[in-house]
Image: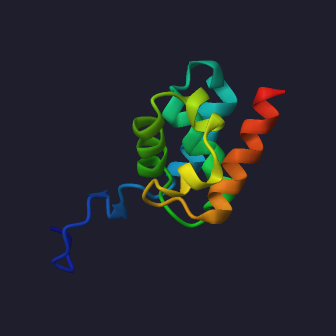
Amino acid sequence: MNEGGENKPETKGKPLHEGHRQRMMERFAADAEHFQDHEILEVLLYNAIPRSNTNPIAHALINSFGSLAEVFRASVKELMLVNGVGKRTAEYIRCIGLCYQR
């Protein structure tokens, strides 16, 4: 537990996930080719979901559709069935999928 009695993971007084997006983008810039599929999707989702943790959503999408390619082939309706994916996010993913297919 932290000082406030909450069960939030901390590192040296800072929340564990603080700076996560910055670290991910630094890793991406240095070595994107070695990212796992869920990590690629997590980074893409930063643009559609600017203020939430996109990691669990990326994992849920991969688990639901089986692969990154299948996520990008899914329809907006299918994508919206995944917890955390709203209409705007589903449309964003679908648009990327169309670019990916062309």
- Vertical arrangement, residue 8 with respect to residue 80, above or below: below
- Vertical arrangement, residue 34 with respect to residue 43, above or below: above
**Along the viewing direction, whichever of 19 and 83 lies nearer the viewer:** 83
- Vertical arrangement, residue 43 with respect to residue 5, above or below: above
- Vertical arrangement, residue 16 with respect to residue 7, above or below: above
Residue pictured at 64% horizontal, 35% vertical: 73
Check the image and name the residue furthest to the right. 102
**Along the viewing direction, whichever of 28 and 93 lies nearer the viewer:** 93
Check the image and name the residue furthest to the top. 34
* Residue 71 image position (x, y, % from top left): 57, 37
**Which part of the image, by quadrant, shows the N terminus?**
bottom left
Which colouring convention does the figure follow? rainbow
Q: With 91 as the anchor, is 8 left or right in this view?
A: left
Residue pictured at 45% horizontal, 29% vertical: 66
Residue pictured at 42% horizontal, 41% vertical: 59
Q: With 32 as the anchor, is 56 left or right in this view?
A: left
* Residue 2 image position (x, y, % from top left): 20, 70
Q: Quadrant of residue 64?
A: top left
* Residue 69 image position (x, y, % from top left): 60, 27
Q: How many marks?
A: 0
**Along the viewing direction, whichever of 68 and 10 lies nearer the viewer:** 68
